[in-house]
Image (cartoon, helix red, strand yellow):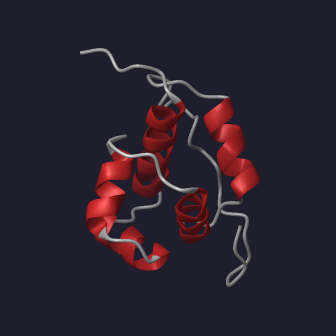
């Protein structure tokens, strides 16, 4: 089954890839970001469009800036992952958000 290349799908793929790359479970990322596991699951499956404040919370929990996350979304398409599109390394110092 082919997936339509939408910004929500690309964001979902990148968030899931970044989470897995860092060895973080859905439960741990949800806890770190202050959202429910159910909400995170819907975001990672591209079944919902997250609000920007939610994306900001997820970026902070993954230790990336909004600029880095946005650049990854802009430069990626479904099918690119995990070939490097989510290879954003943590850059935020501890305690500093995106």
Q: Residue furthest top?
A: 2
Quadrant of the rendered structure where residue 4 is? top left
Q: Residue furthest bottom?
A: 95
**18 versus 32 height, above or below:** above
- Nearest to the observer: residue 24 or residue 30: 30
- Nearest to the observer: residue 36 or residue 80: 36
Q: Position of residue 69 (x, y in %)?
A: 65, 49
How many numbered discs sit on the rendered protein?
0
Q: Position of residue 71 (x, y in %)?
A: 72, 40
Q: Which quadrant would the C terminus be assigned to in this image?
A: bottom right
Quadrant of the rendered structure where residue 64 is? bottom right
Q: Position of residue 53 (x, y in %)?
A: 59, 64
Q: Position of residue 6 (x, y in %)?
A: 49, 26
- At 73% from the left edge and 64% from the top edge, which residue is drawn? 91
**89 versus 98 height, above or below:** above
On screen, residue 17 versus residue 59, left or right, reads left
- At 56% from the left edge and 69% from the top edge, which residue is drawn? 57
Q: Which quadrant would the N terminus be assigned to in this image?
A: top left
- At 45% from the left edge and 53% from the top edge, which residue is drawn? 21
- Nearest to the observer: residue 48 or residue 74: 48
């Amino acid at each position: 089954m082919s997936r339509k290349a939408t910004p929500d799908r690309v964001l979902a793929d990148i968030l899931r890839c970044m989470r897995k790359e860092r060895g973080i479970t859905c439960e741990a990322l949800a806890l770190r970001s202050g959202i429910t596991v159910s909400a995170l699951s819907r975001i990672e499956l591209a079944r919902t469009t997250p609000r920007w404040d939610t994306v900001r919370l997820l970026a902070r929990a993954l230790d990336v800036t909004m600029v880095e996350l946005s650049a990854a979304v802009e430069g990626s398409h479904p099918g690119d992952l995990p070939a490097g599109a989510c290879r954003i390394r943590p850059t935020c110092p501890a305690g500093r958000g995106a």
